[in-house]
Image (cartoon, grey):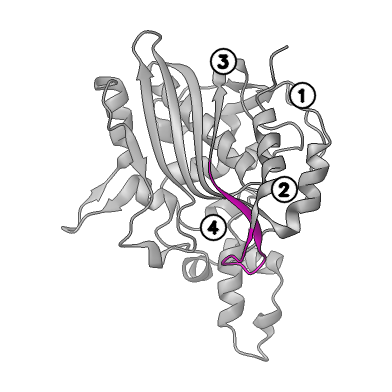
């Protein structure tokens, strides 16, 4: 019997629990960590949205579409009921308020409501700096020009699919200090097999929150690889994930153990209901996951 591909992820959680070295981290929460890990998923065998806990795939896809649009403000996400980037600007806002100010005790939901309602407030406090989308679509050069790396990838896949330079990167060292969070999934590269016309995608992740973030990262790598294949006339191949500092936060240990007690279910199928003329014109309504029947969600706190 063939091993379920999600078993790779469960094995990683087990490895972190059993052999991960405890480390002090930026957030102060602490982690159990290893260095260097790889997983591969054949997209012809199902779309890799993990099933041993519910993954909110629409939230993941909305985030990827926002990145592909070049977005860098949480307003566009909060308007779509996506809150995964709100912790960082919220903390920055609260820390900036003087003691005794009523805004010092502003709740997260109130902060987000002001982001949506007040464009000026959103511009000042919702901006994340030159994060993923800015680098992918508008990498600034010394002479003031901007490079659209994703459009270059599309052009190469259409016109020079054997190139070894079909990639985009988010690690712009000149602008790291301006970002709310430096890119974790920093490097994407694509490969076309001429014998099968299949497009495969790989991603290097410098820092990996294995319990909360990794399921999103895998789903989004599969998502962008599938969209690029559709837009450039290729079939889907596999995705390959390369994790560098791979860690499990110490306040996620019990959740990981609970997830390990569950058996994976069959991966769903990604259905694309509409093919727009451009990669940048998809909306979340263009997608459905057929046959997604996961185990229940297992909530865990975000380390900021």
Q: Position of residue 231 (x, y in %)?
A: 40, 23
Mark 4 or mark 2: whose residue is earlier in sequence: 2
Which residue is at the far top? Answer: 195
Residue tagged by mark 4? 74
Measure the C-alpha gap from mark 1 to mark 3: 16 Å
Q: Is residue 300 visible?
A: no
Residue tagged by mark 2? 17
- Residue 197, image quadrant: top left
**Helix, strand, or loop for circle 3?**
helix
Q: Nearer the viewer, mark 2 or mark 3?
A: 2
- Whether the residues at callouts 1 and 2 have beta carbons within 8 Å, the answer is no
- Residue 269, image quadrant: top right
Residue tagged by mark 3? 44
Q: Quadrant of the C terminus?
A: bottom right
Q: Nearer the viewer, mark 1 or mark 2?
A: 2
Measure the C-alpha gap from mark 4 to mark 2: 33 Å
Residue span colored magenta: 22-36
Given residues 258 and 54, the one toward you in this image is 258
């Amino acid at each position: 019997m063939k091993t379920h591909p999600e078993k790779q992820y469960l094995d990683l959680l087990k490895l972190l629990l059993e052999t991960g070295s405890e480390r002090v981290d930026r957030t102060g929460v602490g982690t159990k960590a290893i260095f260097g890990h790889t997983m591969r998923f054949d997209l012809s065998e199902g779309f890799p949205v993990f099933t041993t806990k519910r993954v909110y795939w629409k939230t993941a896809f909305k985030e990827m579409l926002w990145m592909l649009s070049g977005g860098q403000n949480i307003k566009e996400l909060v308007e779509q009921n996506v809150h995964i980037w709100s912790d960082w600007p919220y903390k920055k806002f609260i820390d900036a308020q003087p003691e005794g100010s009523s805004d010092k005790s502003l709740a997260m939901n109130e902060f987000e409501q002001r982001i949506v309602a007040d464009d000026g407030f959103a511009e000042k406090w919702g901006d994340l700096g030159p994060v993923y989308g800015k680098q992918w679509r508008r990498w600034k050069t010394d002479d003031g020009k901007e490079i659209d790396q994703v459009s270059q990838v599309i052009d190469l896949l259409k016109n020079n699919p054997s190139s070894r330079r079909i990639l985009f990167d988010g690690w712009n060292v000149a602008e790291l200090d301006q970002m709310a969070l430096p890119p974790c999934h920093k490097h994407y590269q694509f490969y076309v097999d001429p014998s099968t016309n299949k497009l495969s995608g790989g991603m290097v992740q410098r820092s990996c929150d294995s319990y909360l973030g990794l399921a999103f990262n895998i789903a989004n790598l599969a998502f962008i690889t599938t969209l690029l294949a559709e837009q450039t006339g290729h079939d889907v191949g596999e995705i390959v994930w390369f994790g560098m500092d791979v860690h499990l936060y110490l306040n996620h240990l019990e959740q990981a153990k609970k997830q390990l007690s569950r058996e994976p279910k069959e991966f769903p199928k990604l259905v694309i209901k509409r093919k727009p003329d451009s990669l940048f014109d998809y909306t979340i309504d263009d997608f459905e996951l057929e046959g997604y029947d996961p185990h229940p969600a297992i909530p865990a706190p975000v380390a900021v």
